[in-house]
Image (cartoon, helix red, strand yellow):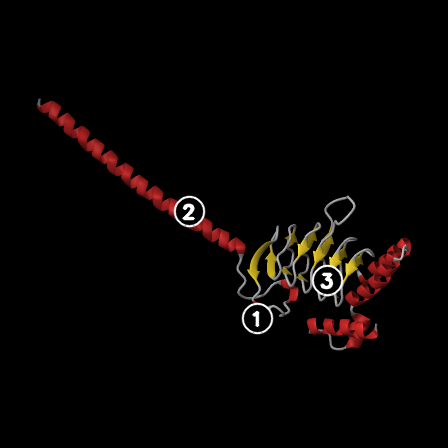
């Protein structure tokens, strides 16, 4: 158990350059505290002490600003960076080595029983403010950019941004284990909105050229018709 705890702390230090020591993580990281409290409340929940599980979960929310339902299943080395306003719903499932930033929501979209919340597979990174809603699956080592809204399953290894979220990049195998803060690379990331605007601009240019050609043809035909009319009028006057 002690080895697992040290492994969890070291994984946080590896993902946060601001963390200078294990002691600093233990005493000053609310994400660390939230996960430790959840593990206890989850144990209570699983052993039938549902009220106590919810009570300890509520205490954890008060102390850390992180709300994790005691029914949620969390793997090893979860890192909740900054932590404030993170919400993890009852049927959420989180794999090993997942990173969540502040204001992330793993929420449900139905009032029924059964699976209502997301599943995050191993190595997923979710940027601040992102919302992952419903019983969707975010594939292994995928990235969800800040403020994205995910409503459908996410393939492994891709980067998702936007509202609703869409794929903007696939991770290279050589960089599959690289950690990317906030889930969005800062360079060489295509902007889907700019791409759409460029596409519309090209279509407008093509339409403008076509209209110009049509206007030229109509003008030439009008001049030809007018010339023929003048010629026909001259022939009549001579007759």
Decide which of 159, 75 is in the foreground and name it.
75
Tell me the element at label 1: helix
Please tell me whether residue 169 is drawn above or below residue 236 in the rendered image: below
Q: CA distance from mark 3 to mark 1?
A: 22 Å
Marked residue nearer the N-terminal end (3 or 1): 3
Marked residue nearer the N-terminal end (1 or 2): 1
Is 25 situated left or right of 211 in this image? Answer: right
Residue occupied by mark 2: 204
Decide which of 172, 109 is in the foreground and name it.
172
Crowding around mark 1 (Cα neighbors within 10 Å: few <14, some 14 to 19, many 20+) is few
Residue at 60 percent of width and 56 percent of height: 161
Please identify the quadrant where the C terminus is shown.
Answer: top left
Q: Are marks 1 and 2 in contact (CB under 8 Å)?
A: no
Disc on res. 174? 1
Q: Are marks 3 and 2 in contact (CB under 8 Å)?
A: no
Q: CA distance from mark 1 to mark 2?
A: 40 Å
Q: Position of residue 80 (x, y in %)?
A: 74, 64
Is 190 situated left or right of 8 in this image? Answer: left
Q: Position of residue 15 (x, y in %)?
A: 69, 71
Is 204 situated left or right of 3 in this image? Answer: left
Classify residue 10 by image quadrant: bottom right
Task: Let me know if residue 86 appears in the view.
Answer: no
Residue occupied by mark 3: 95
Q: CA distance from mark 3 to mark 2?
A: 47 Å
Crowding around mark 2 (Cα neighbors within 10 Å: few <14, some 14 to 19, many 20+) is few
Q: Residue furthest bottom?
A: 21
Residue at 51 percent of width and 55 percent of height: 194
Q: Position of residue 13 (x, y in %)?
A: 72, 74
Q: Residue furthest top?
A: 239
Tell me the element at label 3: loop
């Amino acid at each position: 158990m002690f080895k697992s705890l040290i492994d969890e702390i070291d994984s946080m230090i590896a993902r946060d350059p601001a963390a200078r020591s294990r002691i600093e993580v233990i005493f000053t990281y609310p994400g660390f505290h939230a996960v430790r409290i959840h593990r206890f409340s989850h144990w209570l929940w699983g052993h039938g002490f549902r009220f106590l599980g919810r009570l300890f979960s509520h205490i954890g929310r008060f102390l850390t600003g992180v709300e994790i339902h005691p029914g949620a299943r969390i793997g090893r080395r979860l890192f909740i960076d900054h932590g404030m306003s993170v919400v993890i719903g009852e049927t959420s499932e989180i794999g090993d080595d997942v990173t969540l930033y502040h204001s992330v929501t793993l929420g449900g979209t139905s009032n029924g029983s059964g699976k209502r919340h997301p599943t995050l597979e191993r190595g997923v990174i979710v940027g601040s403010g992102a919302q992952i809603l419903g019983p969707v699956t975010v594939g292994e080592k995928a990235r969800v950019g800040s403020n994205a809204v995910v409503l459908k399953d996410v393939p492994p290894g891709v980067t998702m941004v936007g509202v609703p979220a869409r794929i903007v990049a696939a991770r290279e195998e050589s960089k599959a284990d690289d950690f990317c803060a906030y889930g969005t690379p800062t360079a060489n990331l295509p902007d889907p909105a700019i791409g759409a605007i460029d596409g519309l601009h090209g279509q407008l240019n093509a339409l403008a050229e076509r209209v110009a050609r049509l206007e030229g043809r109509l003008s030439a035909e009008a001049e030809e018709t007018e010339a023929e009319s003048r010629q026909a009028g001259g022939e009549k006057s001579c007759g």
